[in-house]
Amino acid sequence: MYVITKEGVESLVRRLLDPVEADRCRSELEKMLEIKEVLSWRADAGPCCAARVMSPGLYGEAQLLQAALDALDKGDYQEAAALVGEFSHEAERNGSYRIW
């Protein structure tokens, strides 16, 4: 089981800034994105809701993680780290860390 914690995200930012470690961070970013997408589904889609709707806070967090993955794929580790840092601030502002 993977749990998103503030300390874990801070560690991820540091590892993304190290070119040797950065390539190994992809699966962690993918897992974080998957968790945010599942939480969004559970938070917003009721039993009668056919369409997937994401809460604005979780949607923004997911978008930042997707952008970080895109930056990582381009080899822009600085940008990926900055986006994960922004994700951390957004998650803290949204109270997402309290979930875990």
Image (spheres, rainbow, N blue to C red):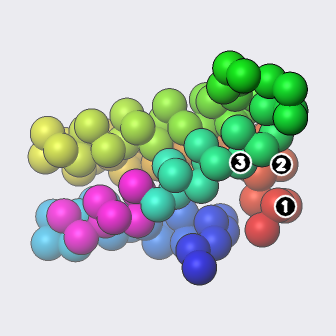
User: Which quadrant is the C terminus positioned in?
Assistant: bottom right
Mark 1 residue crowding within 10 angstroms, few (<14) / some (14–19) / many (20+): few
Q: Is residue 100 above or below residue 69?
A: below
Is 91 contained in the magenta span? Answer: no
Q: Where residue 5 sits in the image (x, y, percent)?
A: 66, 69
Nearest to viewer (mark 1 / mark 3): 3
Task: Give the alpha-carbon distance from disc 2 to disc 1, as whole Å.
Answer: 6 Å
Dot 2 and dot 1 residues touching (CB under 8 Å):
yes
Please tell me whether mark 1 sits on a helix, a strand or a loop: helix
Tell me what residue is drawn at x 70 percent, y 39 percent: 41
- Characterize the magenta stretch by its predominant secondary structure: helix
Q: In this view, does 26 lie above or below 43?
A: below
Image quadrant assignment for residue 43: top right
Tell me what residue is drawn at x 49 percent, y 35 percent: 64
Which residue is at the front of the view, 39 or 6?
A: 39
Q: In this view, does 33 lie above or below 5?
A: above
Q: Mark 2 points at which residue?
A: 95
Residue 75 in sight from this viewpoint: yes
Q: What stretch is highlighted in magenta?
A: 23-30
Please tell me whether mark 2 sits on a helix, a strand or a loop: loop
Mark 3 residue crowding within 10 angstroms, few (<14) / some (14–19) / many (20+): some
Image quadrant assignment for residue 52: top right
- Does residue 48 appear left or right of residue 89 in this picture? right
- Does residue 31 appear left or right of residue 7 in this picture? left
Q: Where residue 51 sits in the image (x, y, percent)?
A: 68, 20
Q: Where residue 96 sits in the image (x, y, percent)?
A: 77, 51
- Does residue 90 appear left or right of residue 13 in this picture? right
Q: Mark 1 points at which residue?
A: 98
**Disc 2 marks which amino acid?**
Gly
**Disc 3 marks which amino acid?**
Leu
Labels 1 and 3: the sequence-earlier one: 3
